[in-house]
Amino acid sequence: MPGSEMILEVKNLSKVYDKEVINIGQLSFRRGRIYGIIGPSGAGKSTFLRLINFLEAPTTGDIYFKGEPVFMNGRGAGLPVLQKMTMVFQKPLLFKTSVKENIAYGLKARGFKKEEIQERVETLLKKVGLNEFAGRLATTLSGGEAQRVALARAVAFEPALLLLDEPTANLDPSNVELIERLILDLNRDTDMTIVMVTHNIFQARRIPQEVIFLHEGRVVETGETEKMFTSPEDPRTRAFVEGRMIF
Amino acid sequence: MSLLFEGILQAFKLILTLDPYMMQIVLLSLQVSGMAVLFATLAGVPLGTYLGLKPAERTRFAGKLLYTLMGLPPVVAGLVFYLLFSRMGPLGVLGLLWTPAAMIIAQFALALPIIAGLTMIGIRGSGKEVQETARTLGAGKLLTAWTVVRESRFAIFGAVVTGLGRVIAEVGAVMIVGGNIEGRTRVMTTAIVLETGKGNFELAVGLGLALLVISFAINSLLYHFQGGGKDNAW
C-alpha cells in the first residue's frame, strides 16, 4: 500500500569536505509519496540527494533501501539497488544520440526486450509531448524539451525512487507547468517515491505531500506540506517559508 | 627550383604507374604505423579514460608524465628501444632489432602518450557528468565506461588522428630500430632521407607526395566519421 512501506531511510548520515556539509540524524521516505526538500542556498539539499543516490559516499552513516542496509560501515550499494533508483539533474546531460535512444538507455541497461523498449519509449514520448522529436538529436533540444526527455528517460524503467534536483530551475513557465503535471501524474499513476529538491517555495507548496527543511546541512523540521507552510514550529522554517530567509 | 618541379613530375609518374619499389615502401609504412596506432589506441583510450575520470589532483604525476612523453623526441625513443633490443640489451634475446616489429613497438611508444593524454583531456571536459548520468540510469561499470568513450568520441578521434600524424611522419625511431633495410624495414620517411642523400630527388619527392596523400586520405576518412566536427554526427 502506498505510503506505508519505507523505501529509503538514512541514519546518522554525514558528509565532510573541508567542513561538515551534511549531518542528518534520521530521515525516512515512504512508498508512493512526494517529498520536497527545501532550504536556503548552501543548505546541503543537492549534496543530500547525491549521497542517497550513491554518487558520493557519505563520511559516516547508514542507508537502508526497503529495510535492507545498502550503505553501512563505508561500504556502498551494488548495481541491483542502484537500478531501482534514479536522479534527474538541474541541468540534464543528454547523450549525443537521438531522443528515443536517450529514453531507451536505462531500459537497455536493464536488459529489456526490444519490443518492450519501443512500446515504453513511444508511450513516454507522447506523455512528455515530444513524439515528433523521436529521431531528433537530443543535444539540439531546448532547455525545457531536454528536461522533459531527461524525466522520460528517468521514469522509463519505473524506478522505486526518483530523485529530482531542481528539475524546473531556469525553465519557462509553460515547461515548469508541464513538468509539474508530469510529476503529479507519476504520483497518481504509480507508487514511485519522489524526492524533489527545490528552491521555489511556491512549487514546494504545490507539489510535495511532505516537506523537509534543511539548514546548514541539518534537518530543522519535517512534516505535511500544508502544516509546514501554515504553522511551522521552528522560527527558521517560518522565516524561510515566509520568504525572509534566502541565504 | 626546376629540380623540384622535375621531381614533382617524376613523382606523379611513379605514383600513377604504381612503381613496385615505391609501393612496397608505402605498404610497409602503412602496416607499421597502422599497427602502432591501433595498439596505442587500444591501450591509450582506456588509460586516458581512466585518468580523465579520476580527480585531477589524484592523477597529477601521471598527467605530467604523459605530457612529457607526448613531446618525446623520436630519436630518443629509437635509442631506448635500440638499447633494449640490441644483442647486448635485456630484450636482445627476442631478436627484434632491424625488424618491423621493433619499429611498431617504437612507434607505439610515441603514439601512446599522445592518444592517452589527449583522451584524458577530452574526457576531463564532460566525462564525469556522463559517468554520473549513466550511473543514475542504472548502467554497470562496462556500459558506463563505454558511454563515456562514446560521448567523448570527437576528442578521441582527434587523439587518434594526432597520434597517427605523429608516427607516420617520424623518421628517427624507425631509422634507429629498423635500420632502413631495403625490402624489410624501409619506410617512406627513411627512404626519403636515403634517396635525398643519393640525389634521387624524383623518388624522394614521390614518396613525400605519397606520404601527404595517404595522410590526407586517412585524415579525411576519420574526419568523415567524426561528422566533419559537427555535433550531430552519428
Image (spheres, coloured by chain):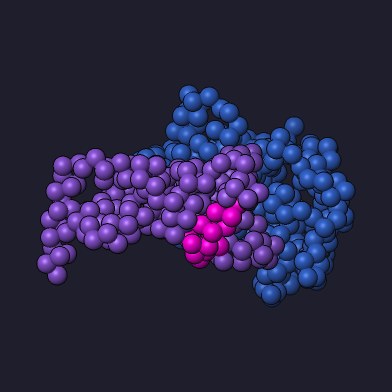
Chain colours: A blue, B purple
Residue A208 point in image, percent of width and height: 67, 51
Residue A182 sits inside the magenta stretch: no
First to last magenta residue range: B69-84
Q: Quadrant of the N terminus of chain B?
A: bottom left
Frontmost residue, A228 versus B51? B51
Is B187 on the left-hand or right-hand side of A235? left
Q: How many marks?
A: 0
Using the image, determine if residue A21 lies above or below residue A109. below
Question: In which image quadrant can residue A223 be found?
Answer: bottom right
Q: Nearer the viewer, residue A160 or B196?
A: B196
- Quick check: can you spot residue B40? no
What is the quadrant of residue A12 in the picture?
bottom right
Q: Residue at x 63, y 51 (%)?
A: B89
Q: Is residue A152 above or below residue B175?
A: above
Residue drawn at 57 percent across, 66 percent down = B68
Q: Residue at x 11, y 67 (%)?
A: B2
Residue A197, position as x, y percentages in the image: 66, 57
Position above or below: B167 against A159 = below
- Observer-nearest of B131 and A171: B131
